[in-house]
Image (cartoon, rainbow, N blue to C red):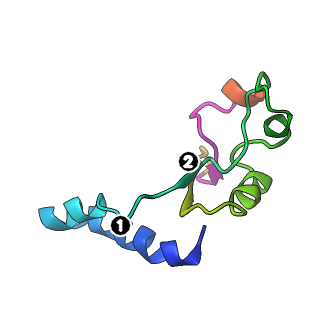
Amino acid sequence: MALESLPLSVSSSTKFSSDDENKKQEAFAFPKFVVMGHRGFGMNMLQSPDEKMKSIKENSILSFNVAAEFPIDFIEFDVQVTRDGCPVIFHDIFMFTQEQVRFP
């Protein structure tokens, strides 16, 4: 994530918590066309025709670092919280849907 985008991200997130409707609307207004790295750069779909995309898993440190090499404004990712309160970066609510994790 580019440091110059950080103030916009922080100010946008704090505006959502305001009771002022004008501030809430400002949170959706970007000063320019914004380019995002959705879940970084990678892809979890093994059927991708691009061999490079198969080697980089989305939502991984490698995926975020590769995305940062491009002229993007920020990287979007999802955070899920485990039952024991630990935040993890993962798109789906159920981990086994993508990674076939087995739970006891």
Q: Is residue 104 visible?
A: no
Residue type at mark 1: give it.
Answer: Ser
Residue found 34% across the figure and 63% down from its top: 30
Q: Is residue 34 above or below residue 48?
A: below
Extreme-top residue of the structure: 47
Of residues 40 and 61, the one nearer the viewer is 40
Residue to which mark 2 is pinned: 78
Disc 1 packing (10 Å; few <14; some 14–19; many ≥20): some
Percent x, y of residue 79: 56, 50
Q: Does the magenta-highlighted stretch encompass residue 87?
A: yes
Mark 1 lies on a secondary structure that is helix
Q: Which mark is residue 12?
A: 1
Disc 2 packing (10 Å; few <14; some 14–19; many ≥20): some
Q: Is residue 93 above or below residue 27?
A: above
Q: Quick check: 31 left or right of 46?
A: left
Of residues 76 and 96, the one nearer the viewer is 76
The span picked out in magenta is 85-95
Q: Which mark is residue 103?
A: none
Percent x, y of residue 2: 59, 72
Q: Quick check: 88 left or right of 44?
A: left
How many numbered marks, from 0 up?
Answer: 2
Magenta segment, prevailing SS (helix, strand or loop)? loop
Q: Quick check: 77 left or right of 44?
A: left
